Amino acid sequence: MVDALGGSVRVDSNGRTTVTGAGSDIDFGATVEKIVEAKRRPAVRLENRIAENQVKVDAMTDLQNRLSTLQQAADQLRGKPTFDNSGNVFEAKEGFLTATRNDSLQASTATSIMTANVENAAQPGSYDLEVLRTAQGQQVAGGSVASASTALDSVDNLGGSFTGGTFTVNGRKVAVAATDSLLDVRDKINAANSGNNATGVNAQVVSISDSEAILTLTAETPGETIGLEETGGSPLRDLGIIVDDGSGTGDFKNELRQAESSIFRINGLSDGSVSESDAFNVDPKADNLQAIDGFGLTGDQTLSFKVDNGVEPRTITRTYDTAGTSLQDIAADVNDNVFGVSARVVTESDGTSRLEFNAEKTGAEQRSQSLTLAPGDALSNLSEVEAAEAFDLEITNYGAGGTAPQSKTLSFTGANSLQEIANVITADTDLKMSAKVTGNGTESRLEIASNDGGKVSVIDASGDLTPTLGLSPDNDVPSLAVSDALATELGIGVADAVSRKTNTVDDLLGGSTINLYKAERGTDIQFDIERDQDAVNTAIQDFVTAYNEVKQFINAQRLETPLEGQDPDAENSVVGALRGEAILRQVEQRLSGFLANGARNSTGEFSVLAQAGIQFVDNEKINDATLEDTLQIDPQKLNDRLLNDFDDLSKLFQFGFSSDNSNLQMTGYTGATSAVDANLEITATDGVVDAVSVNGTNVDIEQNGSRFTIKDGPLTGLSLLFSGTGTGAVTETVSISTSDGIGSAAFFDADKLSNNRPRDGIIQSEIDRVIGRNDRTGLNDRLQDQVDRIDRSLEREREALTRQFIAMEQALLELESARDRLSQFAASLSNGD
């Protein structure tokens, strides 16, 4: 902008307006900027260094990420110690199911009968299974009503006799009103099936016809029963759910389905819970026992059922008229009258029939966790309990079948012992329970059981004793013994079968979970657990790919060649940014190191990758120079090693540990742990490790009870668990051997290079040196400080120059004004003024 006097207007960074050149016609603002620009060249050079450093940081971050991927790949191959082997790909397993039959019938597909989940902790093996029965929850129904949506006390429904009331469903209270409909009752029962103490019972209304609806209750968990008790009025009896015997806990009027455990055969194993008779060629419903070919008994005969839950065995005896009783009659009678035992008649593929009995888990036992107490020690010996602390336990025995529940609140303090608690429970005759303390003298467990097989409930009425004791339902399967002359005549004995109160069986084969979907007697399921060679193959390929990506990056940086996705012409391109940098040499040396060293001190047949079909590319045959010295896999050779030399292949990659004493187990190691043979002398007192020497030299240890970590010497970082023998002071000498595989070495080298821990990771330390970290000032920060100082100095100089030029302009303007006045005066003289 030019004003009336000439010149231009400039606005500086502080918003000040200056007219330049008004007196001299010189744009001194531009002149000042040129002067400042010339003097700022050192700052520009510093800014260029900052930008170059940032590009190097970006390149190092890319390299760091590639090394992190390599570390993750090596982590799968290194044999990482975990409780369940979940971190070790060489322990990965896979399962296969095959269904076959030996008769003319067609077997269902194996996965329609069962499936299996296999974890790394599973052991390879083959198992033959036959699913005889799946577990199911109890299901009951009420009587019918005319309308599910009309009030129950209406004349059309229950004839106006329904008055409502209260009842409990598995301990949760439900209140219904006379004006509630059947749908309302359903919703209220389902509302109790929520929260922390959900009933586990689902209610449904089934419309049989337009004028007939019934309420059904189903235990959602297989094997579970439904516990109902009227606590006010007679709503359950009025609805036709329980028998009207006046007790409020009568038998179910219409049991649609019993609660039953699953039963299956597996490799001829037996848990003692299943008994079965011989198979007979009779009509199980129409023929009496005397119709059985060769049956030698007459008159009344008995069967005795002994159910042993490990705490309080109980025996129930039933009598049968051999001339008027069929196999089906016995099964029905046992289901009705032998609480805790289910019975059925099963038909074999050849048409013969046999009786099958199963001891059901009724929740009749509660067991505490193992506590560090002698049976007579006061509870206050536990750190969580004070001697004067008071506890009230509400203990309930729900009884066998439809018998009324018995409940008592018993009071204890921290001064009581487990044995005293057991004695009080057993002495209370109303509860009909037995309790005992088991253990080894220093550790004890409280066990509580119903004498009649009823479900046991123990809750805190006040205080928090149950979580302290760790009381929970006992999951052990009860055993069943069926005896007497009739049992012998029918050939009843313990079956080669096991039962579980669930269709999800996770406690039979370690590391495997079996899911049962349907029973198919006579169909054999072969369940094979094998090493997952495909998982190992994939892990090795991932390792090679990750290594190659690091190596290719290093090659590309040295050659200043862009990799895929990199634009060499882009602003701040990382192409060649690390060429000549020491960090590339350090990374390459470590990569070359773990490949050249191979497996050290290993007992396997392989020590280098080439023996496993992994070797360097032929640099003379590649077209891309960035691929020089990368790795390639011979698929056929690697597959052969996986199939025939699996253990040797695992030793090539893994860190190995062996000991001549089973009392010593490895729990961890670090990159500082050497591959050596050594003799350890371990001294412990009552299981607590006091001192350790390695090859006769005492070493520092970090100790935590029986666990310790060696802190110096060749075994630095090795963590061990020593179980020892006996009590008191113990000293044992153990010979051990450690080996270091390529996967293990690669993991720790890649970690050392790539981790972002302060002052630990090599690359991260270099990045931190450049850009800083937390309170640590980086090189770029210091360079930027220099730039800022130069700019502040130049800003002061700019202001000084500007002031000088302004002063000059003012002086020139004043001279110009004086000249104009003189000219005007001279002109006036010449005109005679």
Image (cartoon, rainbow, N blue to C red):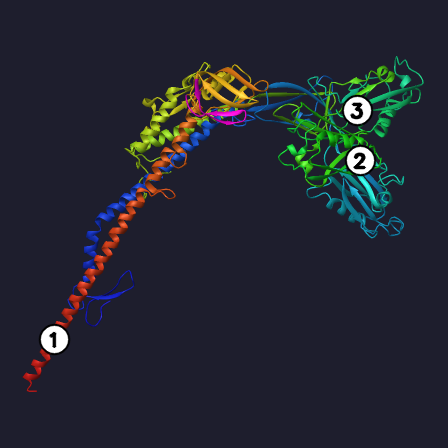
**Nearer to me, 195 or 119:** 195
Q: Secondary structure at mark 2?
A: loop
Q: Position of residue 334 (x, y in %)?
A: 84, 26
Residue 614 on the magenta segment: no
Tell me if mark 1 has few (under 14), some (14-19) or many (20+) residues whose alpha carbon lies within 10 angstroms of its own. Answer: few
Magenta region's main secondary structure? Answer: strand
Q: Is residue 47 above or below residue 688?
A: below
Q: Residue at x 19, y 60 (%)?
A: 801
In the picture of the structure, the residue carrying the numbered disc 3 is: 313
| Residue 67 rendering spot, x and y as whole percentages | 40, 32
Q: Which mark is residue 461?
A: none
Quadrant placement of the N terminus: bottom left
Bounds of the magenta segment: 697-713
Q: Is residue 532 visible?
A: no
Secondary structure category for the residue under label 3: loop
Residue type, mark 2 in image: Tyr
